[in-house]
Amino acid sequence: MNSLTKYFPLSKKISIDKFISKALYNKDYGYYSKKIPFGRNGDFITSPGITYLFSELIALWIISLWEHLDKPKIFNVVELGPGDGQMCKTLIGVFKKFPIFSRSVNIFLYEKSNTLRNLQKKNLKKEKINWVNNFNSIKKGPVIFLGNEFFDAIPIKQFKKVNNILYEQYVKLENNSEIKTFLKKADSKTVAELKKYNLLKGQTFIEFPKQGLAELDSIISSIKKLNGGLMLIDYGFLKQSSKNTLQSVKNHKINMIFNNVGNADITSLVNFNLIKNYLKKKKLKVNNIVTQKFFLERMGIMNRAERISKKMNFKNKSDLYFRVQRLINPKQMGELFKAVSAFKLKKKFSLGFN
């Protein structure tokens, strides 16, 4: 039996988001179940792996939010899709320098992959952390959700408009060896849903994060119950442009989407305006969407780099500034990556966003 057959039902036809779900998250043969994707020996690297300064500034942002809330005795931090645990480890290191905060904070990691959970537990052993499948166990105190490159890894639906008729993108397996795309007419309920989010006007190719919005719903529900908020940092866009943004990487190089299925990452660009409007509709107070460069510079990344580099030799100093530039340079991650934050709070909190 060809290895591709396991990603398809007996009918051999499946919507693109369901295909991506199987390719990434199937417990037996999905990408995140089989391998460690991070770092030089993996397929990609994220901001916390580029320099610890990224996570340090996130930690200071969290502590500032806690102070803004008058230092509650119970304060919950939930990291969404915590990768190899690198950001969490740095957060904890900073938190320990603020003893009152450290005693108040409860840390939760939301991770679907058992393989990555085991890696996180190995990298974060001896730390007091709760791994969760949902947020029902968080009962008291405000909560802040953090997602760095969380949304881009959630499968999306794709649609194409032909002669003003909407079709959904499906895939099928031919001869048990080749994946082909085909279109299937969308039902009226789907058309109405996309119209509700103003995604159809002037567009011929549409991407819709149905699973992503479902994840967002459970996050919003927890925020409304407990107070608090969320911050998402990801690569994405503000203006729709009828483009197919699905992309795949393997060994730090671009991979064709239907090649190396189950052995390569598949992501898409995040529609930040859609996320912002969705949060607003759910009655959260949303700060302006900013670039990663804007947020990190507002949080003082250059001052921090300057301060710690004074004790470094030339080689280490050069390496540090090279890494910081990778995060904030407009031609690298600086402007492609965006940040959005939203809250249910009595007093506005906009640190890093204004």
Image (cartoon, rainbow, N blue to C red):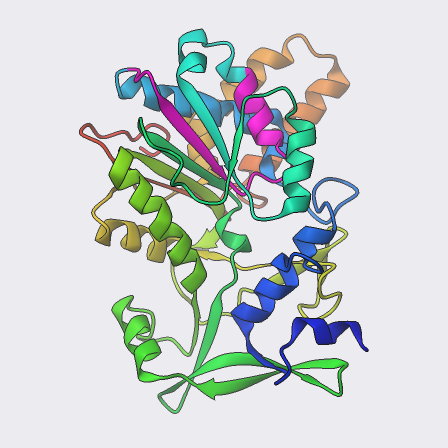
Q: Nearer the viewer, residue 161 or 323?
A: 161
Q: Is residue 227 above or below residue 60?
A: below
Q: Is residue 352 left or right of residue 116?
A: left
Q: Is residue 73 left or right of residue 154?
A: left
Q: Residue at x 73, y 49 (%)?
A: 43
**Residue bounds of the magenta highlight:** 71-93
Q: How many marks?
A: 0
Q: Is residue 282 visible?
A: yes
Q: Is residue 185 left or right of residue 286?
A: right
Indicate whether residue 177 is drawn in magenta: no
Question: Where is residue 326, by image quadrant?
Answer: top right
Q: Residue at x 57, y 30 (%)?
A: 87
Residue furthest out toward the bottom: 163
Q: Residue at x 79, y 43 (%)?
A: 41
User: x, y (%) of residue 30?
Assistant: 67, 59
Residue furthest out toward the left: 346
User: x, y (%) of residue 312?
Assistant: 70, 12
Q: Is residue 65 left or right of residue 128?
A: left
User: x, y (%) of residue 29?
Assistant: 71, 60
Q: Residue at x 75, y 46 (%)?
A: 42
Q: Is residue 209 visible?
A: no
Q: Is residue 213 above or below residue 190?
A: above
Q: Give the position of the C terminus as an image quadrant.
A: top left
Residue furthest out toward the right: 1
Q: Give the position of the N terminus as an image quadrant.
A: bottom right
Question: Where is residue 49, by image quadrant?
Answer: top right
User: x, y (%) of residue 34?
Assistant: 73, 52
Q: Is residue 182 above or below residue 152?
A: below
Q: Nearer the viewer, residue 235 or 284?
A: 284
